[in-house]
Amino acid sequence: MNSDVLPVPLAPITARRSPGLIVRDACSSNGFPPSCREIFESFIMGQEFTNALQQTPLWRFANRVYLPNKIALLAWQDDYAAQVNDIIAIAFALQQGLSLPACWWQDDSVTHLRPLIGRVRHYRTGLDGALKRNALTFELMLEGLDIQLLQALFVDAELGSGDLVEHYALSLGVKKGALAPLIQTLLRVTDST
């Protein structure tokens, strides 16, 4: 069988030596071991995922509001264990006249992915250089998947769970009205773009 036509996982394995260590990698077409990013993009991410993500309205909204509000969003994440994507989804729903089902933050579609995002985020903090950049890229890809899962949960406002801001704030154990100013700030960013 001609090994040149086999996909990377089935391609011949070559050994790479390091003092006291043997690592086996499937070589990519250029003869070098594929990076984590190359593997992820070719098998999971793919062009279809990238295109779908760019077409997701919530992703585009998140890209507009995240950077100008990064410090405040991450403070809510650190101080109250809030999910940044949930806060952004609330602002998006209010802007678009949409809602989310009751307790969407407990929906199986998002609860299974979020611990993995957290582990990658935690792992990334101890890395340097290219490994850190690759871990960040992987984390952002997982965040993109989380955004797509949230996008699929949106319903018409009449079918939703009422006051999204207060329901979510209550789930975080914060006082009534505490989250509203951040949501209003996110909505102002989108009004000015």
Image (spheres, rainbow, N blue to C red):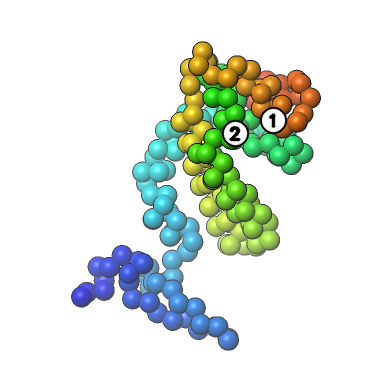
Q: CA distance from mark 2 to mark 1?
A: 9 Å
Residue 156: image location, x then y, percent: 48, 17
What's under tag 2, amino acid-wise?
Trp
Residue 25: image location, x then y, percent: 43, 73
| Residue behind mark 1 | 171
SS of the residue under disc 2: helix
Which mark sits nearer the N-terminus, 2 or 1?
2
Res. 105 mark: 2
Q: Let me know if residue 48 appears in the view.
A: yes
Residue 126: image location, x then y, percent: 68, 61
Residue 62: image location, x then y, percent: 56, 32
Labelled pair 2, 1 in contact (Cβ < 8 Å): yes
Write the residue at 42% across / 33% down.
Answer: 55
Mark 1 neighbour density, 10 Å: few (under 14) some (14–19) many (20 or more)? few
User: In screen coordinates, is 169 left or right of 155?
Assistant: right
**Which of the 4 quarters of the picture holds residue 84?**
top right
Q: Does 50 appear above or below 58?
A: below
User: In screen coordinates, is 185 left or right of 114?
Assistant: right
Write the residue at 40% across / 43% down.
Answer: 49
The quadrant in which the N terminus is found is bottom left
